[in-house]
Amino acid sequence: MSAVQFEVPAIVPADPSANIADLLEERVKATPDRPLFAVPEGSGWRDIAASEFRRQVIALAKGFVASGIEPGDKVGFLARTTYEWTLVDFALFYAGAVMVPIYETSSPSQIQWILQDSGAVALIVESADHAARVDEVRGDLPLIRDVWQLGLGAIGKLSDAGSAVGDDEIERRRGIAVGADIATLIYTSGSTGRPKGCVLTHSNFVELSRNAAKALDEVVQVPGSSTLLFITTAHVFARFISILNIHAGVKTGHQPDTKQLLPALGSFKPTYLLAVPRVFEKVYNSAEQKAEAGGKGKIFRAAAHAAIEHSTLLQEGKRIPLALKIKFALFDKLVYSKLRNAMGGNVRYAVSGSAPLGPRLGHFFHSLGVTILEGYGLTETTAPATVNLAKKSKIGTVGPALPGVGVRLAEDGEVEVRGINVFKEYWRNPEATAAAFDGEWFKTGDVGSFDSEGFLTITGRKKEIIVTAGGKNVAPAALEDPIRANPIVGQVVVVGDQKPFIAALITLDPEMLPTWLANNNLPGDMSLADAAAHAAVRAEVQRAIDEANTHVSRAESIRKFTILPSEWTEASGHLTPKMSIKRNVIMSDFSLQIEELYSEPVNTTNVSIP
C-alpha cells in the first residue's frame, strides 16, 4: 500500500521579513554585470545586466510614486509576455504597490470584473486594442484614475515624471512589505464560473523561489542558463519562473508570438524551456507532417518509435538491445539532431505544466536529449507544488513535492497541499476560502495517486469524473490526452455522465489540417466544415480514438464521436487563457450535439461511427 502523504522539508530557512524586491537586490549585489534579460535587436538579442535592470526598475517605480500610487494600491496590468512585463512587475514591487495581472485576451466584461473586484486604482495596458476594451467599461470603474499605455511610451514618460522622487523614498517603499503581506492578486482563469482573486504573498514567491532553485539547481543554476518565455506572464506559472530566474540569475528572453517561436528559439538558444503540453505536441506533429511532405514520414515514425522504446527501457533500468542501439544512433543523426537544432541546440530541460503531458511525448523528447520535467500546481499554490527533478524524474508522473511543501491524498483520492507555496485566501471571499481548506491543507479538486517514492500522478479533476448509467467511473483525461496527440485533432471533450456509454466531441486543428490534407492527397484549403464530414478525416479521428481505447476497459471506451465544424478558442469562450477546456461551457453550448450522440443506442461490441 502506497503512503498517502509526503512532505519535503524546506532546504532554505524561512525569512519572514523578506519580500520579492529583496531577490533583485541580492542578485545585483552578487552579480551586477550578469545578463538577466535579453531583448530582440535586429536579428539577434541585446543583453540587459542585473544592475541596468535595477536602474530601470527604480526609475519606473519613481514614476509610479510621482503619479500618486501609494503603498498597498492595486494596479491592473494587461499586456503580452515581453521584457516590459517583468520591468513593470518589479517597479510596482519597489513602489510598494500590488499588481493585478489580467490576461491580454480578456473581454471587456472580464476586465471590468477583475478591476472592480480588486479595487484597482490604475491600469497599465500594452496596445490600442487593449485600451479600446478598457474604454468600453471605463464608465463602470470609478476607482480607476489613470490608464497608461506601453505602446504610447508610458514607461519613458513615467520614468521622466519621477525624476524628482528621491532614492530614499523608493528604498523606504521597497522595504515596507514583509513576507506575510500580499504581493499580487491573481485571478483564476474561470474555467468554472466567475474568476476568484488569489492572494499570493511575498513569502509564497520568495520561499518557493529559494527552495525551487536548490531543487532544480541543474536547470536554473548552471553557468550560462537561459530561457525564452512565451507563455503569458499573467499566468502564475510564467510569473513564478520570471521571479525564480531573477533569484537564480537565469537570462530570460521573451517571444509573445508563438508563430515566431521557432525562429526565436534558433537565435536565442535557451538552455531550458517552460511550456504547456500543447507546445510539445505541436513541435512533434509539425516535424512529423514536414517529414511526411518530404516523403520521409515512414522514417520519422520509425525514429519516434525507436526513441520511445529506447527511453522507456532506460527509465525501467533495462538493457538496451544492440539492434536498438544501432538504430538509435542512426536516427540521432537523421532525425533527432535536426529537432534539437530547431529548438536552438542548447535545450537540456523543459518544465511542463498546466495539463498532463503523456508518456509518449515525455519519452520522445527524452531521447532527443531534452528531459521534460513535468510538474503540478495551481494559481493557489503559486504554480508548482510538485515537479520532477533533474537528478530523478519519472515520465508519466508530476514528480515529488518541492522542498517546503506537503502533499496528501484525501480518502476520495483528492490531492491536498500545504506549505510555503499555498496562497493566503481568496480576495474578499471568506466563504470560498473556507470551502477550499481542510485545516491548513488546500483542497485542489484534482484526483491523484502516489508511488512508493512519493512521485505523484494526476488522474483527473474530481468534478470531471464521469459516472456512466452503468455506474462506471471514467476520468476524461485518460482518453482525451492520447486523442489530442493526433495532428489533426484540436480539442476533445469526452462525455457520458449518466449515459449508457462514453462518447466524444472533437474539433479539428486548423493549423495542422492543411498539411495533413495535402499529405493525404486531399485539397489543403478544405474548410473545417467540409473536413469534419470527410470520410478520410473521420477515419483518421477514428484511428486516434481506437488507439486511445486500447488504454482503457471496454466500459470506459469511446463508442461514438462527432466532429464539430468549428474550433474552440479563447475568443469563442470555450478555452481559458492557458488553453484549458471550459468543460461546463462546452457541455452547455453543445448540448444538442451531445444528445444526438445518444439518440440511437449502440449495441455492437466494437467502436461505431455515428
Image: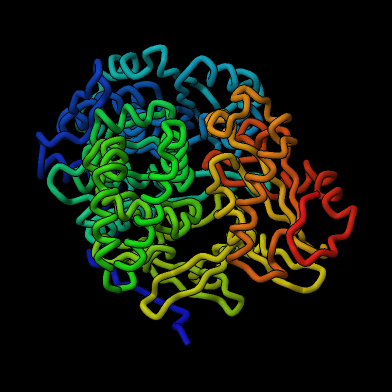
Left or right: 548, with 504 as reference point = left
Q: Is residue 63 above or below residue 428?
A: above
Q: Quadrant of residue 607?
A: bottom right
Q: Nearer the viewer, residue 31 or 464?
A: 464
Q: Quadrant of residue 216?
A: bottom left
Query: Where residue 32 appears, x then y in whole percent?
Result: 10, 36
Query: Where residue 47 appears, x then y in whole percent?
Result: 18, 27
Q: Is residue 428 above or below residue 515?
A: below
The residue at the point 26 percent across, 51 percent down is 369
Query: Where residue 479 appears, x then y in whole percent?
Result: 61, 58
Q: Quadrant of residue 189?
A: top right
Left or right: 465, with 81 as reference point = right
Q: Nearer the viewer, residue 149 or 320?
A: 320
From this viewpoint, is residue 211 visible?
Answer: yes
The residue at the point 51 percent across, 14 percent down is 128
Q: Is residue 271 above or below residue 314?
A: above
Left or right: 218, with 485 as reference point = left
The residue at the point 23 percent across, 32 percent down is 37
